[in-house]
């Protein structure tokens, strides 16, 4: 059903906030709570009295302060954040493991900033050493997911029109 398609919700300052269903976006639009920024070309939702272009991106009419959204630090979520890609060699296939960048015996913690997705062979090669000692380099610095990475990696991109708002262009 079209009314179940995903809509990207932006804050009033165009910062990505969340994703909701088109049904919910249209209700907010009719209540004057959001402005429609992008629509799916030519697709319309019909009610008894009117037809409305199917929204793809909406923006809140006023700014909301969003409480910090906590994503659980789990093995699965680390792999998801890193898009099932080894952060050392870029491999995307096969079983992925979670590697402590700074090993526990060097007081490396269980944090978003110290855990990365690694393929089994890189994890073996690195062993119980920091990357420099193993002669390995991270392809990017691991970060705690924010709203933008949350939508990019955890929910996924439903429509090409979202990309400029998620800084993927
Ligand atoms: Zn690897």
Image (tube, rainbow, N blue to C red):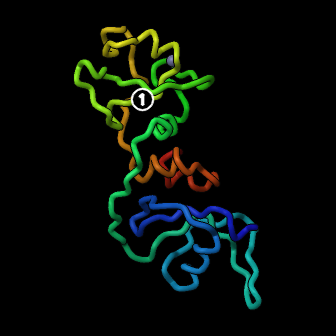
The part of the image, by quadrant, that contains residue 93 is top right
Q: In which quarter of the image is the N terminus?
A: bottom right
Residue at the location (54% across, 68% down)? 58
**For this view, does 32 lie left or right of residue 158?**
left
- Looking at the image, is 103 positioned above or below residue 63? above
As drawn, the residue found furthest toward the left would be 107
Q: In this view, does 110 lie above or below 168?
A: above
Quarter of the rendering containing residue 137: top left
Q: Where is residue 86 in the image (x, y as percent from the top left)?
A: 51, 24
Residue 88, picture quadrant: top left
Q: Total number of numbered labels?
A: 1
Horizontal and vertical percent position of residue 21 = 61, 67
Q: Nearer the viewer, residue 128 or 44?
A: 128
Across and down, in percent, residue 30 comes to 58, 84
Badge 1 residue CB within 8 Å of ligand 1? no
Residue 159 in the image: above or below residue 80: below
Q: Which residue is drawn at 46% across and 12% down?
A: 124
- In the picture provided, is 132 more to the left or to the right than 17? left
State the residue lying farthest toward the bottom.
49
- 90 vs 165, nearest the viewer: 90
Count residues near mark 1 (Cα–Cα under 10 Å), then give few for <14, some for 14-19, many for 20+: many
- Residue located 33% across and 63% down the image: 67
Residue under numbered circle 1: 116
29 sits to left or right of 54: left
Q: Is mark 1 on a helix, strand or loop?
A: strand
Could you tell me which residue is drawn at 54 percent across and 79 percent down? 28
Give coordinates of residue 151: x percent, y percent.
50, 51
């Amino acid at each position: 059903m079209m009314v179940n398609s995903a809509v990207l919700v932006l804050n009033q300052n165009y910062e990505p906030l969340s994703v909701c269903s088109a049904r919910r976006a249209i209700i907010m639009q009719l209540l004057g709570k959001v402005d429609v920024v992008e629509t799916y070309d030519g697709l319309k939702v019909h009610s008894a009295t009117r037809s409305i272009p199917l929204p793809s991106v909406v923006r809140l009419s006023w700014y909301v302060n969003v409480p910090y959204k906590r994503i659980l630090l789990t093995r699965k979520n680390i792999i998801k954040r890193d898009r099932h890609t080894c952060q050392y060699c870029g491999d995307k296939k096969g079983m992925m493991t979670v590697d402590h960048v700074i090993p526990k015996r060097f007081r490396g913690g269980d944090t978003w900033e110290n855990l990365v997705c690694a393929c089994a062979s890189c994890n073996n090669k690195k062993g119980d050493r920091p990357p420099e000692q193993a002669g390995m380099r991270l392809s990017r610095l691991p970060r705690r997911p924010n709203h933008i990475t949350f939508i990019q990696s955890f929910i996924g991109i439903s429509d090409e029109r979202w990309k400029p708002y998620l800084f993927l262009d």
